[in-house]
Amino acid sequence: MPISKRALLPTKNEQLLYVNPLGQLYLFTSGVFLGMAGDRLRGRKNNNCLLIFFSAFLLFMFVFFPVSGGQINLVVGNTRLVLSLICVLFVFVVFLMDLKVVGWIGKFLLFLGETCYSIYLIHPLVALPLAKIFKIFLLDEKYSYLFSIVIVFVLSSLSYKFIERPSIKKAKALSVNLVSDLKY
């Protein structure tokens, strides 16, 4: 007997649990610890073959981790913790690899790295209204996603170039001035 689409969707309580910002705190903390550990381990000679094998194993675990029930079971409870731990370990292992990415892939990854915070902030402001507009005009939902991606990338790039980068420069200059004032 097929499962109804409604049975797969989260309940209101499950949705509130998932979107609670404090529920994401452990991911932020993991990132801070990964950065601190990475700074201490950077420059060491690592065995890339072993790291590639371990990252492939983690990717396999992530893809084939058994989950039953609706989609909400992916993002709450013990399943969420296990999948999150796999992701954190995967990021750490890739971080330890001595990778030199060049060409357009390297440029695209650099773009994503520079604009990731803007993408994070802007994506719901673009994607949600566009999805509603596409639904009103009975347009295919997948085009809404594609259109949203393009608009989010453009707006994030502009935000990084004209807001974030100048703000970072001013903050660095201000902090240098404050530190030099404190020394004397």
Image (spheres, helix red, strand yellow):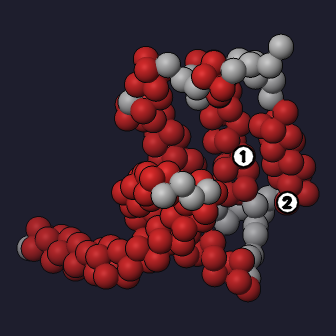
- Give the quarter of the image for residue 3: top right
Q: Nearer the viewer, mark 1 or mark 2?
A: 1
Q: Is residue 10 at least partly visible in the picture?
A: yes
Where is residue 98? Give x, y as percent: 76, 67
Q: How crowded is mark 1: few (under 14 residues within 10 Å), some or many (20 or more)?
A: many
Where is residue 148? Give x, y as percent: 51, 64
Task: Tell me the residue that label 1 is attached to.
Answer: 90
Q: Which residue lies furthest to the top in this view?
A: 1
Q: In the rendering, which numbered label is found on residue 14?
A: none
Q: In the rendering, which numbered label is found on residue 48?
A: 2
Q: Which of 24 and 172 is in front in this view?
A: 24
User: On screen, 40 above or below 4?
Assistant: below
Secondary-structure class at tag 2: helix
User: On screen, 121 above or below 25?
Assistant: below
Tell me which residue sits at (73%, 86%) in the image.
103
Q: Earlier in the sequence, mark 1 or mark 2?
A: 2
* Quadrant of the image containing the N terminus: top right
User: In this rendering, would 5 be left or right of 60?
Assistant: left
Secondary-structure class at tag 1: helix
